[in-house]
Image (cartoon, helix red, strand yellow):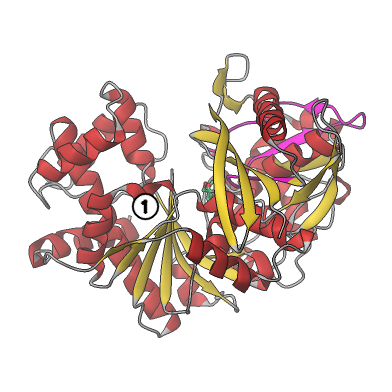
Amino acid sequence: QDAVRCVAVDLGAGSGRVIVAELKDGLIGLTEVHRFTTPLGHDAATGHDVWDSDLIVANVREGLEKAAAIAPVTSVGCDTWGVDFVLLDERREKVGLSVAYRDGRTAGLMDEVFADMPPAEIYRRTGIHFQPYNSLYQLRATAKQHPDWLERARHLLFTPDYLHFALSGEIRNEYTIATTSQLLSLESGDWDGDLLRIAGLKRALMKTPVAPGTVVGEVRLANAARPIKVIAPGSHDTASAVAAAPIASGREAFVSSGTWSLMGIESERAYTGELARRLNFGNEGGVAGTYRVLKNLMGLWLIQRVRKELGDPGFSEVVAAAAAAPAWRTLIDPDDIRFLNPPSMVEAIAAFAAAHGEPAPVGLGAIGRCIFDSLALDYAHVKGELEQLTGQPIDTIRIIGGGSQNALLNQLTADACGVPVTAGPVETSALGNACLQMIALGAMSSLAEARAIVSRSFPLGEYTPKNAVPDAARSRFARLKTAAVAA
Ligand code: LFR
């Protein structure tokens, strides 16, 4: 069999990677050809935190050219974080700024939107969990703060849609990324007209979403003899990550661990009842007609920010320091909204600890340990919620993505959740992205085959519960969570 080569562009809030995936003899291999820091800046005129979308596109092109220089590639697809978007005018030029989702512009806007449509109704229609940065609230902020942007806009492209446009010149909205907006009808898979109006958006700006695996167009490169197909994968990074996770049954939960920890199950049906809403589970659109019933946990963002503030120690240094620090000493609720984008994460953690009678963690090891212990207990908490929601026990946790390299957190997760944990693959978003392209090209027959190939190609780490978590730590954590619900 001849090798099939696809390029997966995987853009996270921290870094972007351009990766060649090669399918040969029933195995898939990855080669990273380009990596860059995702360019985030501050716009002094508006006060917004903004992505530099031109620089992102330049890096994507550079990576694609590097890939094509090594060997011919058949196709390229892009996946990115959710909710953010770019507006284009009638000449298909950018309007306004690509504001980043952690920008403070949506403060108070959820309540304004709720005055127009009650949250229970928004949830019933979209099945999407409430996050202040969902596109619904970001657009409401745009309508209020920069109405001229929306007046001039003729197209709204989510970040991966924009990259596909920049490569191919074609305008499409892809389904999985569209679901993150909280503007899409769960039932029809198309835009909800009332929600678009509440967001301040004309229907004409939106295209009916296309399915993951759709050929969008093609891109020609100076250094490639033939045009390269542009194929939209599950273009939401979490959709791609879970697409490549070798999930074998509904009793397995995944934790897609990167900047965020997205924890949930893959399901044929959506959960939109009262309990799901109260627990704030979202039903994000997946590939092959599945939903990801999940929630966003603040994840390794906490440690990324702490590292920056403490002189940028390497990842393994942080894990080693945390492993040597006393266990279960300081606990926090990682999902507290104050950790979303504080001026100083170290101070925000100290302030949270002080407010909840937890000892202040001092130094890299203690802070790292506090974050990892708290995340593991958070996973155990969400495991319980998933069991409550589905009425089924969870018997395995699959940690996928970059965070699966953290052996300490993997073991703590097994200990806290009391079930086996599998770890890996690491570049699971890029893998899922590439697999959808391979399926579209006919080189793989189905998602099930793709997962079987991934399983054969990437051995996974395995962790079983080893050390008991003290009851006192569990009840302190439970109190933090109860306090959060009451607040
Ligand atoms: C992960 C992710 C999450 C989404 C968050 C913000 O990278 O895509 O799924 O909720 O980023 O867009």
- What residue is shown at x 84% (from left), y 27% (from top)? 93
Q: Position of residue 379 (x, y in %)?
A: 32, 62
Q: Position of residue 442 (x, y in %)?
A: 77, 64
Q: Quadrant of residue 9?
A: top right
Depth check: 272 or 443 in front? 443
- What residue is shown at x 38% (from left), y 40% (from top)? 301
Q: Position of residue 96 (x, y in %)?
A: 74, 26
- Check disc 1: other Cα within 10 Å, few if <14, some if 14-19, many if 20+: many
- What residue is shown at x 17% (from left), y 41% (from top)? 322
In this rendering, the count of numbered labels is: 1
Outermost residue, bottom direction? Answer: 391
Above or below, 125 against 19 in this view is below
Secondary structure beneath disc 1?
helix
Q: Is residue 281 visible?
A: no
| 23 with respect to 301 (left or right) | right
| 216 with respect to 315 (left or right) | right
Q: Position of residue 199 (x, y in %)?
A: 71, 48
Depth check: 41 or 10 in front? 10
Q: Is residue 437 visible?
A: yes
Depth check: 269 or 318 in front? 318
Outermost residue, top direction? Answer: 44
Range of residues picked out in magenta: 76-101
Looking at the figure, which quarter contains the C terminus? Answer: bottom left
| 380 with respect to 272 (left or right) | left
Residue type pointed to by label 1: Ser
Q: Quadrant of residue 71?
A: top right
Give the residue at mark 1: 404
Q: Quadrant of residue 316?
A: top left
Outermost residue, front direction? Answer: 1
Q: Is residue 39 magenta?
A: no
- What residue is shown at x 74% (from left), y 51% (from top)? 232
Q: Is residue 92 magenta?
A: yes
